[in-house]
Image: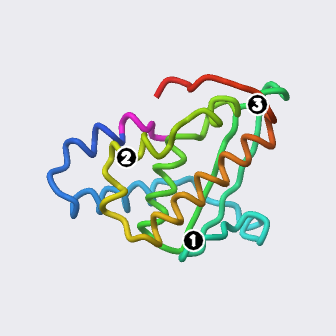
Amino acid sequence: MQIKIEEIEADFALLENWEERYRYIIELGGSLAPYPEAARDAAHKLRGCVSQVWLLCTASGDKDDPVLHFKGDSDAHIVKGLIAIVLALYSGRKASAVRQIDAVARLKRLGLEEHLTPQRSNGLRAMIGRIRAEAEQKCPGRNGTEAPG
């Protein structure tokens, strides 16, 4: 079962300092579902990340507005944790809802922006951009509303 973004936000609020939060982010990365070896290819590799990052999107349900499911992986522990946070925000939502989520505002609540290197921040934006592109491809031009969370 995938952790929800609300749980991550609540856990972050309980942690007293950024050293504990970094450890927690790394733990989140360890909880990612196994990433399929067949999807470790150029088509699934993200550009704009210092570390190697792969992202796989599958869709289910309504073909006009499918539910998107994401898997991700990286060769860097902290990046795997960031992937887990991004997937908690997006995975399991309809494509129209994914397109409406303001990830920057949502992730700002965690304070990540001030505590990541510029390269990690760029990689995080690349992940968000790729997910939004996947949602647009699966549900072009459709306006939705943000799902709860």
The reply to whether the C-beta atoms of the residues labelled 3 and 1 are less than 8 Å apart is: no
Eyeballing the image, is 83 above or below 67? Answer: below
Q: Earlier in the sequence, mark 3 or mark 2?
A: 3
**Coordinates of residue 61 in the picture (x, y in percent):** 78, 27
For image coordinates 79% across by 34% down, the residue present is: 139
Give the residue at x 46% y 58%: 82
Neighbours of disc 1 within 10 Å: few (<14), some (14-19), many (20+):
some
Q: Amino acid at mark 2?
A: Lys
| Residue 88 sits inside the magenta stretch | no
Element type at marker 2?
helix
Q: Is residue 5 magenta?
A: yes
Relative image position of residue 69 (x, y in whole percent): 67, 42
Q: Amino acid at mark 3?
A: Pro
Disc 1 residue type?
Answer: Cys
Q: Which residue is mark 2?
A: 108
Q: Say which element carries label 1.
A: loop
Q: Pinpoint residue 46: horizontal percent, then vertical percent.
A: 66, 66
Q: Is label 2 or label 1 in front?
A: 2
* Label 2–label 1 contact, CB within 8 A: no
Q: CA distance from mark 3 to mark 1?
A: 28 Å
Real-space Cα separation, disc 3 to disc 2, in angstroms: 27 Å
Q: Which residue is mark 3?
A: 66
Q: Earlier in the sequence, mark 3 or mark 1?
A: 1
What is the magenta range? Answer: 1-7
The image quadrant of residue 147 is top right
Q: Which mark is residue 49?
A: 1
The colour scheme used to paint the residues is rainbow
Q: Nearer the viewer, residue 139 or 10?
A: 139
Q: CA distance from mark 2 to mark 1?
A: 20 Å
Q: Nearer the viewer, mark 3 or mark 1?
A: 1
